[in-house]
Structure formats: structure tokens, C-alpha cells
Amino acid sequence: MNAAARIPVLLYHAVMDDPPAWIAEFTVAPSEFGRQLDAVAASGRTAVPVSALAAFLAGRGGLPPRPVVLTFDDGFADLPGPTAEAVASRGLAATAYLTTGAITRGRGSLLPPAPMMDLAEAPLLEQYGMEVGGHTVTHAQLDTLRAADLHRELADSKRALEDVLGHEVAHLAYPHGYNSRAVRRAARAAGYASAVAVRHALSSGRDEPYRIARLIVRRRHTVTDVADWMAGRGARTAPYPDSLPTVGWRAYRRVRARARGPEFAG
């Protein structure tokens, strides 16, 4: 694969008809989701898990000529059922990033209330052919945390998933994409081989293994949008440096976190 080629990495959250208000913007109706998956399958791209893209970016493996990556964040209740079934029925690979505090009874997280899967269902995702990655414990804004709290978010989530799956969990998604150089170093130190951000951009063969760009799928997006992304259109291409507004927003959130404590990344 040409290292400059544009690689769409799609970010989905819940797939349901009647989502809670707080996640509605990032929810896709099941009927529309099916049409979007059909557009991916018809595009001529080959779906691969994040691990394949991460290995390529690290110089440890190859990719098909026109790859695409499907990812799912948080672990909503639809994921280990109709959503995973819809993906598997089309022969598509995918990666699911799970927020362990939100899917473990009594553990708790910063995610507002919503129907969630259970941690014990994580092996079922693998039976459907989905790769499982970590999405922290509480879904906090990682780039505002003190070092010890950041380490706990990364390490405890990884450990919980590894305990239930029985093998290493090597890939991470930053909640809401929030990251920084310190967060990326901490992800590597915690034993993750890659991490995905958001950026709403196409990835590429030159992207950063600990800041892989994703295209966030919103309720307003249609099959036409997905088809454009499959064609390498409709978004800028990573890597590129953080914009000044992004740097300023991070600084503001850090100051606010000192006064309020850890906050939900969303």
C-alpha cells in the first residue's frame, strides 16, 4: 500500500433508534447503519482491525491496497448483539473500545446513563470477529489528569479487559480523542501498541501510531458521506499538527479540571 494513501477509520458509538439525549448526536439508527455498512462493503475496500493498521504504521506488517477500519467506542448494549451481527454478516473486521467502568456493575464511570453491555460479554465480541481495545475506566479527559490518575485510567482498564478475555489488550482509544504528548507517552508506557484519537480526518500510511485519526460518524451523516470517505474524499488527511484552537481548548480544560476535578470527555 502507498504510504500516502488515505485510510478511512470510522468511529461509531451507539446504534439504536431511541438513544438517550446526551449520545443522540453520535448515534446511528440501525436501518441507516446497515446501509452504511453496505456502502463500506461495496466500496472495494478491505476492512481490517486497528491492530493491522498499527502494525503497518510501526513498520511491522503490510496492509491490503485499500484498507478501511471500523471502530466502536464505549460499549453500548447494542454492540454485542445486533451491531456485531450486522458487521459480521457482511464479513467486515472491526475493533471495539470498551469503557470498563461503564460496563462493570458497581464500578462507575463519568458516562451519563445509557443502556450498556456487560464486561462479561466482551468475549462475545471476539466470537463475532471483533478486536477488543481499551477506552479507559471512567471516560475522563485524559489530557487534564494528574500522572497517577492517568496511569490508573490506562492500566486498570487494560487489566480488567485482559482478565475477562484471557489475553493481552494492546490498543487504546482516547475518550473523545483528548490526548497530549504526555498522554501518548503514558499510553506507550502502559503497554499499548497504538492509540486512536478522533480529529475527524482520514488516516494515512504516515499517520502517528499513538494518535491515529478517525472520522466520527454522527446521526446526520448519510450513505453519501460514507461513500465519499471510502473514496478518500470529504475530510483532511492526517498527520498534521494540532491547531491553535485545539491547544487553547486543552489549556482551558486543564485549568477547569484543577478546580472541578476529572470531567467527562464528551
Image: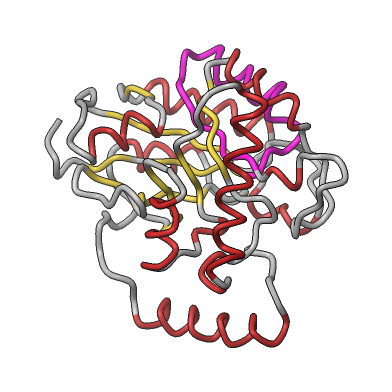
Residue beneath the point at 23% across and 40% down: 57
- Is 52 displayed left or right of 58 in the figure? right
Q: What stretch is highlighted in magenta?
A: 74-98
Q: Which quadrant holds the C terminus?
A: bottom right
Residue beneath the point at 59% across and 30% down: 162
Q: Is residue 22 magenta?
A: no
Say above or below: 232 vs 152. Answer: above
- Is 50 displayed left or right of 146 in the figure? left
Q: Which quadrant holds the N terminus?
A: top left
Exactly how many numbered labels are in the figure?
0
Say above or below: 82 vs 259. Answer: above
| Quarter assignment of residue 86 | top right
Residue 23, given in percent of the width and then of the height, sits at 72, 53
Q: Which of 4 and 33 is in front in this view?
A: 4
| Quarter assignment of residue 204 | top left
Residue 247, given in percent of the width and then of the height, sits at 40, 80
Residue lying farthest to the right in this orientation: 106
